[in-house]
Image (spheres, coloured by chain):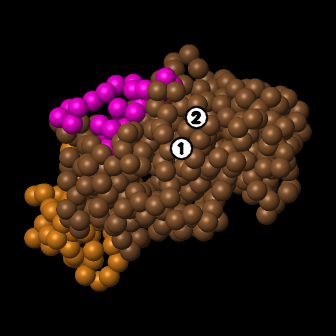
Amino acid sequence: MRSGTVYTETVIWSAPEVFAADVPYQTAIVELDSGGRVTVRISGDRAAIGDRVMEAEPRNGIPFFRKV
Amino acid sequence: MRPVAVVGIGKTAFGAFADRDLRSLAIEAGEKCLQNAQLAPSQVQSFYLGNFAGPSFVGQNHLAPYVSTALGIQGVPSTRIEAACASSGSAFFHAWTEVAAGVYDLVMVVGVEKMTSQPTARVSQILAEAGDCSGEMRVGSTFASLFAMIARRHMYEFGTKKEHLSMVAVKNHAAGALNPQAHMRKVITLEQAMNAKPIAEPLNLYDCSLVSDGAAAVLLAPLERAREFTTKPVRVLGIAQCSDYVALDQKATITTFPAVRRAGEQAYKMAGVAPPEIEFAELHDCFTIAEIIATEDLGFVEKGQGGPYAFAGCTALRGARPVNTSGGLKSKGHPVGATGVAQICDLALQVRGEAGDRQIERHSLGLAENLGGSGATCVVSILGAA
């Protein structure tokens, strides 16, 4: 499982049509320990810049990370 | 390269027009522009259309000849350019190259977008397609959320505050209220701007530009022929288009846009001017944070100081260096494909001294910055009195 640090994040209140049912939801750019950055969804507690996160189970092919 | 001038401008009002289709908007702007330059359509030698997503918004493709023939422009090259929100800035750049290189003398550029025939969630979806659909957009990002993440990082790195963002909205609405062609002619208070409903934290409704219908047009000619068409030619002193990654997570930093910096440097060099000499600007305020970062990337203010600079009123209509005297995308409106050319029209109005109630005192040297996506395309143009 990948792990990393939150580089930036937001909570979305106005979503594209296919994600409208998920509102509000958090997305983040995570700086991976293995190098590079990836844009993911955050599940569970809200994460802030600098927080450590671990990859969780993907849902519908979407990568999810969770605060550790 | 030979010097180039803007010799005609034309714009529709921006707004939500249930009774107008894409072509009628483009024709109105185009005809006003031809009339402004006292030119017959048959004299136009090449035509460019800036349009982001006509096929998705209104179900029509092959848009350049669809528009140009309706304007009576027949037989000549007719080319659509798509570069997200910088579509018509890019079209303007390519039209400029044709005239500067001496390929053609009279080149017309129309920018148009018809957005309001779709519901908001569908509009968000179509706009999201200007991002990386295999990465950032797959997780449910919107353009507001990308700029929200940029804002969060800018706040983290430089101490930018929510009220700095909100002040950009306040001052752009104050200017837009004086623009008879603006979409939302409404003065707002800092308190209203701070407390609107959230869209993507920390951005709220008043940090976001408008979903609008509208069109704008300009006509370019060699400077040496400009006075055949107008008594007030506006010279293109410098111009550049630069590019960068589409996906935000591929950029080394997201609090500066390399495409903006590069385009700015190249345009300044071509014009032979330094940033402090620029008297006023139309900057791409798709979201309030974007205007703040543009003032930094274009050298109006030191990196990280764009927030306090805006909050202090330096970029307000009666400030030291007015930014978005038209009201910007925030108040004037943002029909995506029309925005780049509309910025050129707004600079030209100021340079000519025809900006009415929002006319500023120092108006001989202006800069326009048109940004595509989250910084993958940028066109910077510097215009001045000829």
Whether residue A53 is situated above or below residue B118 in the rendered picture: below
For badge 1, the amino acid type reads His
For badge 2, the amino acid type reads Gly
Kindly identify the residue that appears in the image at 67 percent across and 24 percent down.
B28
What's drawn in magenta, residue-wise? B168-192
The chain drawn brown is chain what? B
Image spot of residue B55 (x, y percent): 61, 38
**Residue B242 location, quadrant:** bottom right
Q: Is residue B107 visible?
A: no
Which sits in the foreground, B200 or B346? B346
Kindly identify the residue that appears in the image at 48 percent across and 62 percent down.
B275
Mark before the other along the chain sequence, 2 or 1 = 2
Image spot of residue A53 (x, y percent): 17, 70
- Which SS class for mark 1? loop
The verdict on a common chain for dots 2 and 1 is: yes
Q: Are marks 2 and 1 in contact (CB under 8 Å)?
A: yes
Q: Which mark is residue B283?
A: none
Image spot of residue B376 (x, y percent): 50, 61
Image spot of residue B361 (x, y percent): 48, 40
Subunit that carries the residue with mark 1: B
**Residue B228 location, quadrant:** top right
Q: Which mark is residue B363?
A: 1
- Which SS class for mark 2? loop
Q: Is residue B175 magenta?
A: yes
Q: What color is chain A drawn in? A: orange
Looking at this view, name the residue that lies furthest to the front. B361
Q: CA distance from mark 2 to mark 1?
A: 7 Å
Kindly identify the residue that appears in the image at 26 percent across and 49 percent down.
B312
Q: Is residue B268 visible?
A: yes
Q: Is residue A46 left or right of residue B271?
A: left
Q: Which mark is residue B353?
A: 2
